[in-house]
Amino acid sequence: MLKNKVAVIYGCSGAVGSAIAGAFAREGARVFLTGRNLSKVDTVAKSIMDAGGRAEAAQVDALDERAVDGHLQSVIDLAGRVDVSFNAIGIPNTILQGVPLVDLDVDQFLLPIATYARSYFLTSRLAARRMVVNGSGVIMTITAVPSRMGIPLVGGFAPAQAAVEALTRGLSAEFAPHGVRVVGLRADGMPETGTIKEVFGLHARAHGISWEHFHEMIASKNHRRRLLTLAELANVAVFMASDQASAMTGSVVNLSMGMLDD
Amino acid sequence: MNIQNKTVLITGANRGIGRALVNEALRRGAKRIYAGTRGAVSVADARVTTLALDVTNASQIEQAATAVNTLDVLINNAGIALYDDLTNFDVIQQHLAVNLFGSLKMSRVFLPLLRRSNGAIVNTLSLMALAPLPLTPAYAISKAAAFNMTQSLRALLAGQGVTVHGVFLGPTDTDMTRGFEIPKASPEAVAQGIFDGLENNQDDIFPDPASQSIAEGWRTGVAKAFERQYAGFVPESAAV
């Protein structure tokens, strides 16, 4: 579905970034993986190449405008264009979640808001500058259910996700007239990921129950009684990045397994 | 919890599953492993420290605690299993002393360190905790008791940042099952299953094919549902 598309992915040291990169490569895209931890990103790139895909790794801090821009230029130099930009960065939640808002340190409240908004703004607008020249491209990111649902103990993470979703709509309003689509994927917590292994633990502890008990509580709230897998997320991401999703822009795909109404 | 760079203490580390746990922990990059044993154990790795540890000996447990200044994971693996027919109460007491009280005493003594590190307690149990093989009823009684104790500890410690895991072992190829001609899992595979379960935050770990076959039914069953219901009734000032 993504034959010969050139894709740049931010956050490939993490479970989501690496799953998306792998799925895009399997569908024929040439993927440029980036992250702050070069050796981790390199490992992911190598496993993609071992499976017959085309992948390159680079160390890029997705909060650094110059680094992102320089890397995009090198991708253009190598591959001629950028078709897909996917921002999958994340920051550790250890001191950001599991704390009541009434106690949370103000800087820890603001940190996710500033980080996710800044990174998405930078990677999106820098990609858009290149994509607009060709009159085509797709800018994507991943958000989370707390953007739309009131949940206790998520600190500034929920406002951060809401900011990213609002930015998705604003970016689309400005870029879509030039042929560049902008879409988000709103996922529930994925237990396969290191992030959720930690985050559910923070919440479980705050509630005085085990991780597994907390997991079961959350999963029982949706229609399928289970949470999203990385493979399912990647399948939707592939479709949304492809030409077949040309109708979708300024939109955040609901991957809450029925827990959230649209 | 991933055990890379973590400190792990394993009781009954000289042979069988305990020995395999030591090797698997080394393979997964643990920073330090305390190998508790009544006898001698020789592991040629600078990351392993042996501790003289008979879990029925209170002063040895206290002594071991002074030798350990940081701990992330306590694996209560030491256990005994003798054939009996419920006619000898001493045999039942013996099994309880090691398999129930040994684990509980170790957990209590090392709890302050585990609280400090937001650590984990892993108790090796047995499928016999759920239903006995009538050849070893005293063993089964002690494992059932240890299982129920594991559930209580889990609820009491959940709000204190210490996770408690129970391992439902099926037949494993060690001295404990010597002479019993049935399909057995290897201690190596079991050790991997245990650390995988810990990494996946599983309350109840089913590390081998025999136990895995009941995992789904267990997790969606009434007994587990009861545990979850009752777990809510933890007293405000729970001091273990």
Image (tube, rainbow, N blue to C red):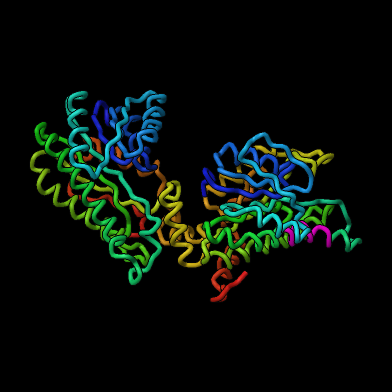
Q: Position of residue B73 (x, y in %)?
A: 59, 52
User: Which residue corresponds to the image point at 18% horizontal and 24% vertical from the top-left?
Assistant: A77
Q: Quadrant of residue B134?
A: bottom right
Q: Quadrant of the C terminus of chain A?
A: bottom left
Q: Quadrant of the N terminus of chain A?
A: top left
Of residue A167 and residue A149, the one placed in the foreground of this image is A167
User: Which residue corresponds to the image point at 26% horizontal and 51% vertical from the top-left?
Assistant: A116
In the rendered image, the residue lying farthest to the right is B87
Q: Which residues are magenta?
A: B93-102
A98 over A69 or under it: above or below: below
A105 sits to left or right of B115: left
A154 over B188 or under it: above or below: below
Of residue A4 and residue B39, the one placed in the foreground of this image is B39
Q: Position of residue B51 (x, y in %)?
A: 71, 48
Query: Is residue A148 in view from this perspective?
Result: no
Q: Position of residue A83 (x, y in %)?
A: 20, 33
Q: Position of residue B84 (x, y in %)?
A: 88, 55
